[in-house]
Amino acid sequence: MAKSLFAALSGHGGKVVPGVSRARPVTGDVDLPSQVDVVVIGGGYVGVCAALSLVSRGVRVALCEKGVIAGEASGRSLGWIDSQFLDPAKMELIGRSKELWAGMNAAVDAETGYRRCGVVSLLPDDGARAFAEDWLDKVRGRRGVDARIVSAAEAAALTPGGTASFVGGLYQPSDACAEPVLAAPAIAEGARRKGAAILQNCAVRGVETSGGAISGVVTERGRIGCQAVVLAGGYWSSLFARSLGIDLPQFQANASMMSIRPTGDDLPETSAWGNGYVWRRQLDGSYTIGAINGVSPVTPDSVRHLFRLLPAIRAMWNEVDPVFNLNTFWNDLMRPTRWRMDEVTPFERNRILMPETRQGYLDQARRRLENDFPGFSGAQALESWAGVLVTTLDNMPVLSAVPSLPGLFLGTGFYYGLTMGPAAGEALADLVMGQTPQFDLHDYRFQRFSDGSKLVFRT
Ligand SMILES: Cc1cc2nc3c(=O)[nH]c(=O)nc-3n(C[C@H](O)[C@H](O)[C@H](O)COP(=O)(O)OP(=O)(O)OC[C@H]3O[C@@H](n4cnc5c(N)ncnc54)[C@H](O)[C@@H]3O)c2cc1C
């Protein structure tokens, strides 16, 4: 207890450091179009997938990114496209996304790193096995679900080189992966080839309205006229919404990852979740590994929404440690929430949001991995990094129009945005165009935060 209090107060892992993108650079557009149909704010998975879906239907699109494509969360993820242990309410979206991911390289004529590698969760004991069986019973037959419980021998065959004893695994062959450094850049370039304008270092400061509805955006480089705006700003969506007088609660967790190059050759192709570690084989044969734990910086927003957040805190207590970093807290507190359109905004002051890496979590994960799979021992450490995940009060993303501001659409609050990005982008394009989405968006509506709905935290 004293130790965890000390860890919380040390604030380690909660600090923001100068941001550097990991993603492959994208050549974008220099000239601002004066008029399009839709402006997409944000060049992460959700924004680039929305732009691709819209432009593929003949819509004129400009995507504005304050930094570079995939500079923030989307270039920093583990790279899994999976649904294990997630709430049944998310399966339609994920199932549709898996279908779209499978055709993504062809759709954008570029390499996203997509591979159907499968994911296996290694089950340490009978309790874990019963938990996996229970989850499977709830999701069996849903779109995109082909998971099954495998025996200890099958789990070992999927993850060669192990020495630890597992009672079996939860294996989903249709789970896949993509390369975070390649995927969003490839999709952005694909959208650009189809006619979308991709504008980097181009923060959107606010919107213009006419007769109460969206009629344009003001960027740091000038105005773009449009009838609709898709806000896919990840961590920053709440602040942007707040500047428009819209309350959109989102919360953050910071997670750390590293890549290693093992020397052995009999190492698993299948991605796995083990005893305190996760791994994924990268396209070049090296591995991304990560700890299961992250940290959640205490922020003025988390204090403001503390009561509403209690179910989330309870649900994530074992995975996310609260940390108090005075600098982060103070900077958030002092950050303006309104500004003039000719003023430099917080979006321009932080082009690439990047938290410090919590190396201690990675060291521990690595030790456990090497203990269970000695083939990973002695691997060369290539890179460590951290990123910010965001979620909402009920851990469901928002895919929704905003009734109080016609023409504004939200695509935000994604804890699994790589997995969900393509179907989220498609659903946003459906909403903008007034078409029927592929699946029911009721659970994703924005109004659930204010219409008295009972919010249930969904894994
Ligand atoms: C360490 C880590 C591991 C993860 N592992 C996985 C995984 O294995 N599988 C999975 O599915 N998910 C994973 N995730 C989560 C996933 O990366 C995110 O859910 C996803 O990247 C969110 O995408 P996004 O488009 O919503 O946001 P982002 O990628 O954050 O993109 C939002 C963009 O909007 C831009 N922006 C914001 N405001 C403005 C503005 N006013 N003007 C212009 N631009 C603006 C930002 O600069 C940013 O680039 C992981 C995340 C992390 C950090």
Image (cartoon, helix red, strand yellow):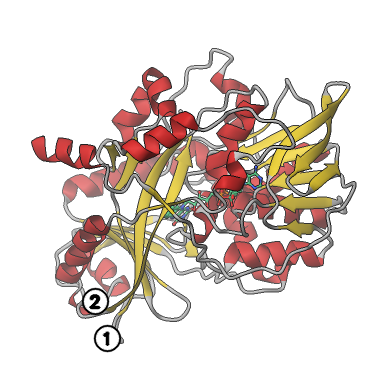
Q: Position of residue 33 (x, y in %)?
A: 87, 53
Disc 2 secondary structure class: helix
Q: Residue at x 50, y 46 (%)?
A: 141
From this view, report whether residue 327 is shown above or below residue 255.
above
**Callout 1: CB less than 8 Å from ligand 1:** no
User: Residue 32: x and y, percent?
Assistant: 83, 54
Contact (Cβ within 8 Å) of mark 2 with mark 1: yes
From the image, which quarter does the C terminus lie in?
top left
| Mark 1, other Cα within 10 Å: few <14 / some 14–19 / many ≥20 | few
Direction from residue 155 to residue 364 in the image, left or right: left
Residue that protrudes farthest toward the left in the picture: 2
Whether the residue under disc 2 has CB within 8 Å of ligand 1 = no
User: Viewed as shown, does residue 2 lie left or right of 265?
Assistant: left
Q: Which picture quadrant has residue 431?
A: top right
Instruction: Classify 72 as above or below 339.
Output: below
Identify the residue shown where x is 60% and y is 54%.
45
Residue 209 is drawn in which quadrant? top right
Question: Residue flagged by tag 1: what amino acid is it?
Answer: Gly
Mark 2 Cα-neighbour bin, 10 Å: few <14, some 14–19, many ≥20: many
Residue 269 screen position, x and y as percent: 38, 75
Residue where numbered disc 1 is placed? 264
The residue that label 2 is drawn on is 376
Q: Is residue 118 above or below residue 416?
A: below
Q: Earlier in the sequence, mark 2 or mark 1?
A: 1
Q: Residue at x 54, y 48 (%)?
A: 350
Quadrant showing the N terminus: top left
